[in-house]
Every structure is written in C-alpha cells, then in structure tokens.
Image: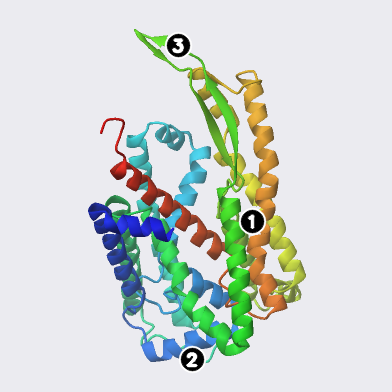
Amino acid sequence: MLTTFARAFRTPDLRKKLLFTLFVIVLFRLGQNVPAPNVDVAVLRETADAARNNNGAYSLIDMFSGGALLKLSVFALGVYPYITASIILQLLTVVIPRLEALKKEGQAGTTKITQYTRYLTVALAVLEGTGLVAMASSGQLFRGVPGGARVLHEAGPLPVATMVACMVAGTAAVMWLGELITERGVGNGMSILIFTQVVAVFPAQFWAIYKTKGTFVLVLVVLVGLAIMAGVVCVEQAQRRIPVQYAKRMVGRRMYGGTSTYIPLKVNQAGIIPVIFASSLLYLPALATQLRPDLPWLNRLAPHLRQDDPWHMAAFFVLIVAFTYFYVAITFNPTEVADNMTKYGGFVPGIRPGRATAEYLDHVLTRITAPGSLYLGVVALIPLLALALLGVGEQFPFGGTGILIVVGVGLDTVKQIESQLQQRNYEGFLR
C-alpha cells in the first residue's frame, strides 16, 4: 500500500488528485470542528467529554460522526443523511418499477437516481437536524449529564431554526465535497469522507485507553487490532469465482465470443449494511426507554439493553445474520444474471443455461453467504466483547462497523490508485 502511494506521488497528475483529496478532507474536518450558531462552546465541551466517558452510546455516536455530532458543529450530520438516502433508494429500486427501469437505462437513469438521492438527503437532513437541535434545546441530547440542558444560549424558535438551517446547509456542502473528490480526486468521495470520520477519533481512543488502562492494555489492543485488520482484509478480498464461457457468434462480418471469464461472488456480499441495520433496530428499544421511562415493561427490558449484556449480544448477532441474507437476496438476482448470460451466449460449464444456471448461482450464493454473515456478526461483536473482557469497549477502535469501513474504503482506494497507475505506466505492445 505504501509503495502504491509513493508511486502515485511520483506521477504528476495523480499527485495533484491526491493533494486535492487531502485538501477537501482538511476542509471537511475544519467544518466538523466549527460550532453552529447559538452553541455555548465551553459548556458543550465539558458536557460532551462527560457523556463520552460515562456512556458507551455517546462514544459510538462520537466515533461515527468524527466527534462532530456531540460538538453540534456545522457538519454535525456528516455524510449519514446521504448514506441513509442511498440505502433507501437502493432498497426502493427493488420495490418500485419506475426506479428499477431507471437503473436499467444506464448513465441517464443513474443520473436521475442520484438527483433523487440528493433531494432525499436534504429532506433527511432537515428531519435529523430538527431532532438533534430539539433534543439539545430540551436537554434530552445529554440526558443525565451535568450541564446537558445548558449547551444552547437560547431555545427560541428563531435560534433553533437558524441552527437547523446551518446543519442542513452543512450536509449539502458535505455532499458537494464528496462529489468533488469523486470527480477530481481519488476514490469514492462519500466513502473517503466516512473513512475520515471514523479514523479521526482513533488517536483520542488510543489516548483514553492509555490513560485509563495503562501501556500493557494499549499494546495488547494494538496487537489484537492488527490481527483483526489482517483477518478482515483476507475475508473482504475472498470471493468465489463462477466460470463463464461465451460461445462464438457472428455479428455482421465479425466474430464475437469464444472467451472465458468469471462472475466474482464475494464472501461478504452485503458489506456493512447488515451491521448498520441491526444497530439501528437495537437502538430503538434503548431510545424508547429514554423517551418513556414511565412504562413498566420498558424498565424491565432496560437491563438487557446494555452493550455488555449477553442477551443484547445474542440479539445483535442473530439480526446481523438475518439482515445479511435479506440484503443479499434483494441486491443480487440470480435469475436476472442467468438471463443476461443467455442473452449474450454465455453459460457456466456443466450447467444448462436459464433456470438451471439461476438455481446454481442461488445455491452457491446461499452457501458463501453463511460464512460471510457469521464473519460480520463476529467482527461486530468485537467491541462488545472488549467491553465485557477488558473494559475498553467504548474506546476499542478495531471492531464493528468502524474497522469494516476503514478496511473496505482503504482497499477500494488503493485498487483505484493502482488501476490509474497501470493506465499511465502501460507501455503497450509497441515500444
């Protein structure tokens, strides 16, 4: 990886793209540290520090927002409204025929879906920003933390509306910065920004482990983290290659086909989406206990909602496995793949085209999804196990969604840099 970046910096146009990407990242981090209007910065800093130290949920929120959400900054919402909108549009594509038709139209349809995603992102930013500012003004954002009700100077309609407008504008700016990276920089812009949010809190987490647990636990966490990262890289790269043979055919006066290729089916076909789904679903009961503490059955459920509770871990693991199968089923259509292969004269050696090929692909995908779902469940449970065994779950950076994002985005970015290097350094057959 380091060799790839060194070669990229020696290439003038790639060096410009990398420096532009770094410049946008700096702007993004600057916006995440600029507080929104009407925020009492001194009180908020003390309150946020106390919340991180006393509540694992706040530490999780802090990690996935790069520290911006608990600072009530201009970029407090970060890339998550866009990510949520993208996931919603991807799921609706399977349900709504109009979106499915747009997806099949090629570049024009993709542009239209991207436009819908932007509109939905702004709508979600308005909802999330309003909820965040309303919770901060009422004292619910830092409930139970000293000073949690005094983080805003004023709680009137105009100051609250101004804060929401600034956060929505910040979300639109983040979306624009991500698209700039995609067009003029290196890698997928939104992935790079979410990678930045996750990595930004690593130094603070390492420092917190060192201050609370000492040098030995810090070294142990680093060693375990490197081993986990190596394992995640291996699984993320693992794939089952289905061989495909294309028959020769005449089109006009030219002969096409007669080539061999393969369909790569990744072990982790679903990515990090099942972990996000499971986390969101399990967060709802915890949110309900905070909003309605007067309900007896919620009070009885509250002890089992702690992250180090065995029932919570078991439910988290089962939900991840279930959502992995669900997401793979709606995003990969074996029948459609088999029909496209038949249309272009392709077939899997030893398997009849059409329905038999679709059944074969579905069988293979089901079998490789089993270890993929178990892998996601185990990786997602690593911070919870670290909390139960070492007491560093809130600060443990090498686990859960965070490590999946870091490894996935890192591998994808390195692959894109290598492909661009090959395009620029390829000498061809004639010299």
Q: From mark 3 to mark 1, how far is it between C-alphas?
A: 43 Å
Q: Quadrant of the N terminus?
A: bottom left
The numbered disc on residue 147 is: 2
N-terminal-most mark, 3 or 1: 3
Of helix, strand and loop, which one carries label 1?
Answer: helix
Residue at the image position 47 percent from the left and 75 percent from the top: 201
The numbered disc on residue 376 is: 1
The numbered disc on residue 114 is: none
Q: Quadrant of residue 301?
A: bottom right
Q: Amino acid at mark 3?
A: Arg
Crowd rating for badge 1 (residues with CA inside 10 Å; few <14, some 14–19, many 20+)? many
Of helix, strand and loop, which one carries label 3?
Answer: strand
N-terminal-most mark, 2 or 1: 2
Residue at the image position 33 percent from the left and 41 percent from the top: 111
Residue 394: where, in percent of width, then height?
A: 59, 77
Q: Which residue is mark 3?
A: 249
Residue 395: where, in percent of width, then height?
A: 57, 78
Q: From mark 2 to mark 1, how far is it between C-alphas?
A: 38 Å
N-terminal-most mark, 2 or 3: 2
Q: Is any atom of residue 65 visible in this view? A: no
Q: Which is in the foreground here, disc 2 or disc 1?
A: 1
Of helix, strand and loop, which one carries label 2?
Answer: loop
Nearest the eye: 314 or 364: 364
Q: Is residue 242 above or below residue 13?
A: above
